[in-house]
């Protein structure tokens, strides 16, 4: 299982929302393969480019994590 996460202000990583093609929330962004996670991350960055701000401290940074 691979999860797309964002670094928050509190210094903890948390899963981003899985948003389908219709713009509906579908829970956390969890995927069976790394390739699916990478594709979603690229799409997520395109959708959020105006809203996503990465601070010098790294807050807002996105990353794919492998979980059990």
Image (cartoon, rainbow, N blue to C red):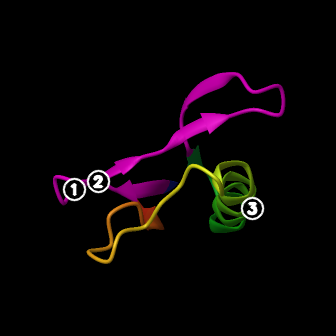
Judging depth in this view, the residue of 5 and 8 nearest the camera is: 8
Frontmost of labels 1 and 3 is 1
Frontmost of labels 2 and 1 is 2
Q: Are circles 1 and 3 on residues that touch, CB within 8 Å? A: no
Task: Report the residue that reaches farthest toward the bottom.
Answer: 56
* Magenta region, residue range: 4-29
Q: Are circles 2 and 1 on residues that touch, CB within 8 Å? A: yes
- The percent coordinates of residue 43 (x first, y second) are 75, 55
Estimate the spatial distance between the alpha carbons at disc 3 and disc 2, rounded to whole Å: 22 Å
Per the image, the residue denoted by label 2 is 8
- The percent coordinates of residue 29 (x first, y second) are 55, 43
Judging depth in this view, the residue of 49 and 23 nearest the camera is: 49
Q: Are circles 3 and 2 on residues that touch, CB within 8 Å? A: no
Per the image, the residue denoted by label 1 is 12
Q: Is residue 6 shown left or right of residue 44?
A: left
Q: Secondary structure at mark 2?
A: loop
Q: Secondary structure at mark 3?
A: helix
* Of callouts 3 and 2, the N-terminal one: 2
Instruction: Identify the mark at residue 39; answer none if there is no mark.
Output: 3
Q: Is residue 18 shown left or right of residue 22?
A: left
Estimate the spatial distance between the alpha carbons at disc 2 and disc 1, rounded to whole Å: 6 Å
Q: Residue at x 21, y 56 (%)?
A: 12
Q: Secondary structure at mark 1?
A: loop
Q: Is residue 48 shown left or right of residue 1?
A: right
Quadrant of the rendered structure where residue 41 is? bottom right
Task: Report the residue that reaches farthest toward the right.
Answer: 21
Frontmost of labels 3 and 2 is 2
């Amino acid at each position: 299982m691979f999860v797309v996460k964002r670094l928050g202000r509190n210094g903890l990583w948390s899963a981003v929302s899985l948003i389908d093609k219709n713009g509906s929330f579908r829970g956390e962004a969890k995927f069976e393969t790394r390739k699916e996670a990478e594709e979603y991350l690229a799409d997520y960055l395109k959708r959020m480019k105006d809203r996503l701000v990465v601070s010098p401290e790294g807050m807002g940074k996105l990353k794919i994590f492998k979980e059990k």
